[in-house]
Image (spheres, rainbow, N blue to C red):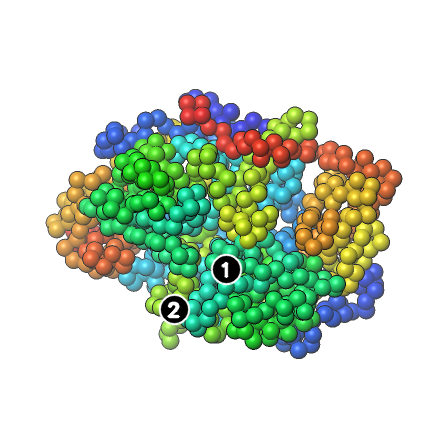
Amino acid sequence: MPFIANTDEQRRQMLAAIGVADVEELFADIPPELRCGPLDVEPGLGEQEVRAKLAALAEHNATGLVGFLGGGFYDHFIPAALDAIVSRSEFYTAYTPYQPEISQGTLQAIYEYQSAICRLTDMEVANASLYDGGTAVYEAIMMALRITGRSKVVVDETVSPIYRKMVRSYTSNLGIALVETAPSNGLPDRSAIAEHVGDDTAAVIVQNPNFFGCIDDVTDLAELVHERGGLLIASCYPISLGLLKTPGRMGADIVVGEGQSLGMPLSFGGPYLGFMATRRKYVRKMPGRIAGRTVDSQGREGFVLTLQAREQHIRRAKATSNICTNQGLCALRALVYMSLLGKGGLVELARICAAKADYLQKRLLAVGGVTMRFPRRWYFNEFVVNLPITADKVIRGLFNRSLAAGFPLGRYFPEMGNCLLVAVTEKRTKEEMDFLAHTLEVIL
Amino acid sequence: MKLIFEKSVPGRRAVRNAGAGGEADANVPLPGSLLRSRPAELPELSELDVVRHFTALSRRNFGIDSGFYPLGSCTMKYNPKATEAVAACPGFADLHPLIPQLPGGEMMVQGALAVLKEMDRLLSEICGMAAFTMQPLAGAHGELTGAMIIAAYHERRGNEKTTILIPDSAHGTNPASAAIAGYDVKSVASDADGVMDLAALRAATDDGVAGMMLTCPNTLGLFNSRIRQIADLIHSVDGLMYYDGANLNPLLGRCRPGDMGFDIVHLNLHKTFATPHGGGGPGAGPVGVVERLVDFLPTSIVRERGDGSYYLDYDRPRSIGYVAPFYGNFAIVLRAYAYILMLGREGLLRVSDNAVLNANYVLAKLRGHYELPYDRICMHECVFSASRQAERSVRALNVAKALIDRGIHPMTVYFPLTVPEAMMIEPTETESMETLDAFIAAMIEIARQAREAPEEVTACPKTTPVAQLDETLAARKPDLASLAETEA
């Protein structure tokens, strides 16, 4: 019997102890008319058969593609030590650390994760993580509404279109005025934003590097929104913070982002990791679990979940969020990843990504008819090129050479049908980048 | 134990990045004004330093693989190792979620779409629903998705609805999810049998009721035989019935939420379908609906073409939209799929059978040693009270800490809120009679100690790396991060 330990003899003994003759008596509360017949589910399979079946399904996925796809989700290398550590079952078969005395491993790891996120973003406090980068943007908006008591938010269109769709879904019933501002040459348009930010505005939301890969210094936007009593929410790509000016230094009040690049496999969309950090003064308005350092009855240092008065199991309908747990194991992955890379390793990795993207950009621009969509802008590891034909055609052509050449922007920006968003990570070799440029030249 | 940052040694490195030190590394084209002024103060350690740090942390943790974990309402069943192997398959793990959004890309992810479609079919069959979305990323996220579907349904119908009814025994996420979706929450009392009071429900039900969120069996482990009447009452005001799937385990293969009259269901794959809890996530909270609500499900949804190939349908004008960036926590859904394939039809029945048998065995053996507020056959979990022990200053929390010293993870305590000094025990089907006997013996021994030497119990835990921690200090003077000295 897979995953059942009780033998027939034990079951008899247990039924006798309960005082019933048959296990069916235990289900007597379920009225007969609510019982279902046999389910239309196939008979069980052995482990070997299941693994063979799923290995066969996995082969129906294109695994040999050389990917230049990003769009907020990146193919970074994951060191073997990371999987070795997080596959310790003391971590992955535990639950939320309700009993701190036997959960110090999880709790200290969360505290260290929060610390690493603060150090990465130059913020003061972080939570134990949220579901993903998109729900983190939504939670940041809700947090800004609570802090300011206002009801309007301004989202720049350079924020991921996927996240903007998510925010629209979540806020559609809540009476929130959601304004989207059009960018100017790939960066947030200061005058457009200034026009919309008033005394009623809870927050302005930007992303850096933004969806088009362009890098910005949003210090001026932070000043603008602060002058009018609102908050700046910045979504960012953690690997880029090895190199780029931090949202904390630019004056952001709430920093969020997708943590997938910190050691999570792409896994067709999840599980990922939403991170969130803020200023100390806003911590009691922050959603999600938070670990804190304290002492035990003998003065020894230890860790607990804290500030739980914000949370659903205490506050119920008045909680800051309905979030019940964090993405525990994903947060652990991120912490282990940052620890393995370390201070110097993250800088080095970010430099390699930026330099490789610069190389690929030059190679692609040497192809006839290819130009930069947003000239005179700076990029980290992702950029947009104009093509002489539709990006869809290019994608289809390059699929045949086992290349996923990038993301065709026409899907979310109809006026950008000829634009391709191209991303590079340390995993792409010079040969692969040369092959992309060469093949593009051949098909154009 | 020292923080990982305190073990840092300047200049030490673990990972060497590909291409480091090469031409590429030297050539960073960005202007200084866009760069950070100093590196993030991450630790500087060797790979062995990092491995030892986290190995030491793992030894200060307790998982299902460490021992019995009867945490009520959390269904801490064994997480089969085969499902981990399946999720690590490169054909799934390395798959970029944007590939199917590329022209021609859907044909490159047919295996992954097949998994999603098969899970839709299997979960719909198991729950008696018409269709499932895999998008919601956790149980509470499924609840929010469900509440958004309720709102979309009423908007479409032109109904003016303001309130969601929730029993007083509900999980805290239920009222929080309803409130975040924009609803007022009205609590409905339980009756003397521990299930929803029908008179109280009738009094609370009016035209403003958008729906009801319910677990069945409830958090006392009791199945409400009048569930159909409750559903009929809610439906009579055009309300929708929402099933919180936290407690589905004892019903697998026997009884389906759809047949009980529920319209929307969320499942916790990390409970019923054995995916790891991960120290608090990631989970997955797929949501199923009856036929008349299918159009409101989140976008996208997997569909099958006549030729047997799969595609993602984004053209869904009545949909509530995106609740996740892509197709849900795919690697979790995949693990649950492997688990269901291994169980099969007869295995599902064995789950509910043994889950209920194990819970009733614990109930029978502990009856008399602890107060049992609702002394009747239970489903997957039983709820005792430490009220008798509390008279000798041994509270539910002390019983929990005494279990820790006996190598057992405590049950859920102080929940449900309707039972004072509650101790909620969910053994799950994967535990053996010997394990239950050891737990029962430990509980009886603690009850004896509580009578004869209560100070022995209240002094627990004594075997852990830290004793009871000062939570008041933690909340009053929050120390939430170790910042680098220059930034502190």
Q: Is residue B314 in sight in this rendering?
A: yes
Q: Is residue B216 left or right of residue B6?
A: right
A426 vs B70, nearest the viewer: B70
Residue B302, above or below A428: below
Quarter occupied by residue B2: top right
- For badge 2, the amino acid type reads Arg
The relative height of residue A267 versus residue B33 in the rendered view (above or below) is: below
Which amino acid type is marked by label 1?
A: Tyr
Picture quarter with the C terminus of chain B: top left
As drawn, is A20 to the left or to the right of A324? Answer: right
User: Toward the viewer: A287 or A299?
Assistant: A287
Q: Residue furthest right?
A: B452
The disc at residue B183 is 1
Q: Is residue A258 visible?
A: no
Q: Which mark, residue B318?
A: 2
Pointer 1 local density, CA inside 10 Å: few below 14, some 14–19, many at least 20: many
Across and down, in percent, residue B64 comes to 64, 47
Q: Position of residue A287 (x, y in %)?
A: 49, 45
Up the image or down, A213 lies above or below B375; here it is: above
> Which chain is disc 1 placed on?
B
Residue B152: percent from the left, percent from the top? Answer: 43, 66
Given the image, what chain letter belongs to the residue carrying mark 2?
B
A378 or A405: nearer the eye?
A378
Q: Quadrant of the N terminus of chain B?
A: top right
